[in-house]
Image (spheres, helix red, strand yellow):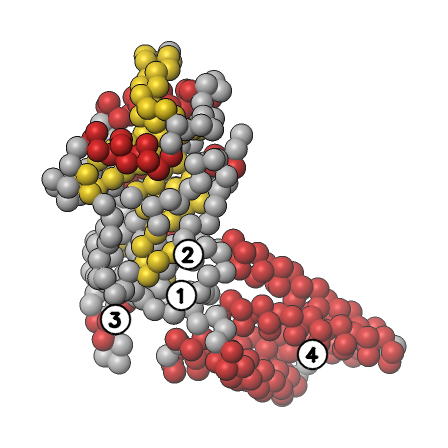
Amino acid sequence: MTMLQSSPLFRYNAYGEMLDFTGVVTDGYYYTGEYMDSETGLYYLRARYMDPATGTFTSMDSYTGNIYEPASLHRYLYANANPVKYCDPSGHSPLASLTTSVSQLTMLQTNALILSMATISGLMNMAVKTLKCMVDYKRLPSGSELANSFWEGFSIGMLVGSVAIFVALCVNMTLLEMSICLAGVSIVQGLINGAYAVYKKDGFDAVTSFLSAAISALTLSYLYGLEVDIPITSGGGISTKAKITVADEVEINNNVADVSGESVTPGITDDVSSGGSSSKTYMTGTEGEEELANLVGGKPQQYRKTSLGGRYIDQLSDDNIAHESKVGYTTLTKRIRMQILKDAELINTGKIAGAHWHFFTSGVTGKGGASQPLLDFLIKNGISFTIH
C-alpha cells in the first residue's frame, strides 16, 4: 500500500470546508479535530452546529457577547470571524488556538493566561507542601500553612508566567512554542532541584523534584507531538510547523498530492492582492479531461473490467494511478457512487495502484467542487481527491 492511501493528509479553507484529501481515514473527525456529520456537512461543536460553507453557526449563541469585542456581538459567527486565531470547540466561546502567536492575544487573554499559570503553580506547591507535612510530621497542614504554600507557588507562577510572555512577545512565539519552552525549563529545574536534594540527602524533595521533571518530560513529548502533527488550518491549511500571521484567505496550489503516490506538502500562496481565486474554468467535461492529461500524463480512456461492470478511466498515469475528471459542482449520484465503488474494487484487486479524483470549476455555471457526502464516500473508499 502506498503512502497516498495510508497517510491521511487534509487541506481545508479557513472555516473547515475540505478542499483536498489524500489517504484513508475511518472516522468523521476532521477540521480542528471536530466531528462532521456526513449527511449535512455540518460540524458538531457541542452547543451548536457550524456550517463550514458559510463560516457561521446554524443557531444563535446564548451568550450575548462582549461590547469590548465587537465581533462577539454577532451571535452566529464562528470564532469571531477569525478562525486563524481562534477555534470554538464548545459552540459558545472562541478560544485561542495553540498555533496563535502570543502577540495576537488581547490584554484580557494575556492576563488570564498568566493568572492561570500562577494558580496552577500555587495549587501544585500547596499539594507538595501538604504531602511533605504528612510525611515529615504525620499531620495535615494548618490553614495558614496551606495559604502560605499556595501564595508562595502563586507568586513564583506569576513571575515565571510574566517572564515567559515577555520572551514570547520578543521572539514572536506561538502559544505552543511557549508551552514547549516552559516544559523544557521545568525539566531542567526539576533535575537541578532533585540533584541538590540528593546531595542534601533529602529523600522527599528528591522524589518530588524528579517526579516533576518526569511529568514535564511527558508534557514536552506530548506538546512536541502536537507541533509535528497538528493540522494548522489557516485558509487552505498549512504544512506542519508553518506560521500564519494574517487572517486572509489562502489558496492551495492545484497539485496538492504527488501523482507518484507519495504524500507531499503542497505550496501555499497568499491570495491577498488579487482578492480572489485564480482557478481555471472549463466549459465541458472534455476540456477538463484535456487539462487532466496535461497535469498527470499517461494514457486516456483506459478500460478495466470489474464485478460491477466496465470502468473507463479518464487518465491512467504512468505509475498506474487512475485519475478521474469532474467539471462543475458534483454530488453523490447513483452513477458517481458506482464509479467510486468500481475504482475501489480496482484498487483492492491490484489492477490499479490507486485512484485520484479531480474537481474543476465550470466556465458555464461558475461552480466547482463536490458535495460533502461525495467527499466522505471517496475518503471511505480510500480514494484521494483535489479540488482545483
Amino acid type at mark 1: Ile
Q: Earlier in the sequence, mark 3 or mark 2?
A: 3
Q: Which mark is residue 238?
A: 2
Q: Is residue 112 visible?
A: no
Vertical order, 357 against 28 (above or below) = above
Report if the CB atoms under discs 2 and 4 are less than 8 Å apart: no
Asked if the residues shown at circle 3 and circle 4 are in contact, with their CB atoms under 8 angstroms apart, the answer is no
Residue 383 placed where, x, y %? 39, 32
> Residue 176, relative to residue 301: is it above or below?
below
Write down the residue under mark 1: 244
Residue at disc 3, secondary structure: helix
Marks 1 and 2: in contact by CB < 8 Å? yes
- Determine which residue is flagged by label 3: 72
In front: mark 3 or mark 4? 3
Tell me the distance, in whole angstroms, between the alpha carbons under discs 2 and 1.
Answer: 8 Å
Q: How many marks?
A: 4
Q: Residue at x 65, y 67 (%)?
A: 216
Is residue 165 left or right of 125 when viewed as pictured?
left
User: Whole-Å distance between the Cαs marked 2 and 4?
Assistant: 45 Å
Report the residue at 28% width, 60% height from top. Answer: 271
On the image, which quarter does residue 136 sit in?
A: bottom right
Marks 3/1: CA distance?
22 Å
Query: The residue under label 4 is which amino acid type?
Result: Lys
Q: Nearer the viewer, residue 269 or 157?
A: 269
Inspect this view and state whether residue 258 appears: yes
Q: Quadrant of the C terminus?
A: top left
Secondary element type, mark 2? loop
Q: Which residue is mark 4?
A: 129
Whichever of labels 3 and 1 marks the residue nearer the N terminus, that label is 3
Along the viewing direction, whichever of 371 and 242 lies nearer the viewer: 242
